[in-house]
Amino acid sequence: MDYHVKDLSLAPQGKLRIEWAEKDMPVLRQIRERFEKEKPLKGLTIAACLHVTTETANLMITLKASGANVYLTASNPLSTQDDVAASLVKDFDIPVFAIHGEDTDTYYMHIKEVLKRKPNITMDDGADLISTLHKQMQEYIQYVYGGTEETTTGVIRLKAMAQKGELKFPVIAVNDAYTKHLFDNRYGTGQSTIDGILRATNRLIAGSTFVVAGYGWCGKGVAMRAKGMGADVIVTEIDPLKALEARMDGFRVMPMIKAVKEGDFFVTVTGNINVIDKEHFEMMKDGAIVANAGHFDVEINIKALEQMAVSSRKIREHVKEYQLKDGRKIYLLAEGRLVNLAAAEGHPAAVMDMSFANQALSAEYIYKNHEKLENKVYKVPDELDLQVAKLKLASMKIEIDTLTKEQIEYLSSWEFGT
């Protein structure tokens, strides 16, 4: 198939939304202007498995401007914005294989469609492209120079592959760039997760007890924003350093088995499985609202909840009510998938500007350096990270100091003392 989207007639609305996001992505715009002149990826094929949003659309347009042939599929069945997918196909001639709400079979059929294009560069958000290549379509690996990975969960999977010697080409962990995880993960996830919960429930956060499972950069962002909305925030953790940091940041810290007795809202952001399990549902308060902001829908044990429930019903868009034997009701948001993308629009364009600038520059770096890269996971080169930061500051009209000659000499010498 040439493309597979819900409805091409949605394209006009999608194009307007793509333009709206582009206004807040000045770094990516500057990279696109250079790509249009230099065509650094001319003739290459790029397969991207990302959330099909307005921000992603601008990345795809940038990559096409570089001279590459670009194919896009969704990295989550509920994150596709159908009007954006339609516009990319109709207005920008970029093949997209993604439909909001697609079933698992269709999801993987779409992934295989883009891999059949024999990509030279893969671009992942969750490592599904790379894992499918390695498990089911190894005959296409020979064409791949390297890949990029957007999210924490994907980086974890890829590092596990590399450690076992099973990764067949180099991958750049875009997620680990400072201009990605310090801003996208913290401020993007923080704002968009709260946005998704509010759109789904229209409940008041102020005065509630808000439980955040995991205090990585995403968890920090969610906890920060929930606190700013007036919630009493509890953090659950397995890492003693992160738990200590959460306490020093002003949050209560306790095991999940204790937090479930108090929580009104629950958000998982750990990247791990069954963080909220049967034993936790058994002790939750009546009316508890449970959501996930991690990449995969495994953090909440939904099967256990379904087995415990005597009845269930869809009570609002993106809200499913489960009634337990004792009459308590628990509300699951967005089927346990990424609540910020399934129930809202994902991260704001201003923060994705830096993340996708890293994606574009990393793709260029892979092509120029793939012959000397080993089959392992690399961080984004520091010079690219700093370039993105400088471009972002310039777009914000922010100036910073530079070192004087005297200061450079002082910092590079061991001879100066007290």
Image (cartoon, grey):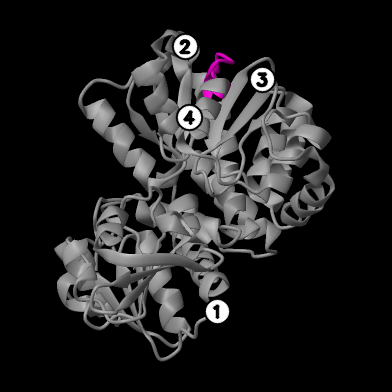
* Residue 370 x, y percent position in the rendering: 46, 18
Element carrying mark 4: helix
Residue on which the image places disc 4: 108
Question: What amino acid is found at the position of numbered circle 3 in the picture?
Answer: Met
Q: Nearer the viewer, residue 92 or 357?
A: 92
Tag of residue 202 = 1
**Which residue is found at the position 27% from the left and 28% from the top?**
161
* Residue 284 x, y percent position in the rendering: 25, 76
The question of residue 116 being in magenta is answered with: yes
Q: CA distance from mark 3 to mark 1?
A: 41 Å
Element carrying mark 2: helix
Between discs 4 and 2, the one toward the N terminus: 4
Query: Could you classify mark 4 by the number of other residues whose Cα lies within 10 Å: few (under 14), some (14-19), or many (20 or more)?
Result: some
Question: What amino acid is found at the position of numbered circle 2 in the picture?
Answer: Tyr
Between discs 4 and 1, the one toward the N terminus: 4
Could you tell me if residue 255 is visible in this image? no
Residue on which the image places disc 2: 140
**Which residue is found at the position 53% from the left and 66% from the top?**
196
Horizontal side of residue 98 vs 89, given as left or right = left
Between discs 1 and 2, the one toward the N terminus: 2
**Which residue is found at the position 51% from the left and 61% from the top?**
340
Q: CA distance from mark 3 to mark 2?
A: 18 Å
- Indicate the quadrant containing the N terminus: top left, top right, bottom left or bottom right: top right
Do callouts 4 and 1 mark residues in contact (Cβ within 8 Å)?
no
Segment colored magenta: 114-122
**Which residue is found at the position 43% from the left and 78% from the top?**
226
Label 1 vs label 2, nearer the camera: 1
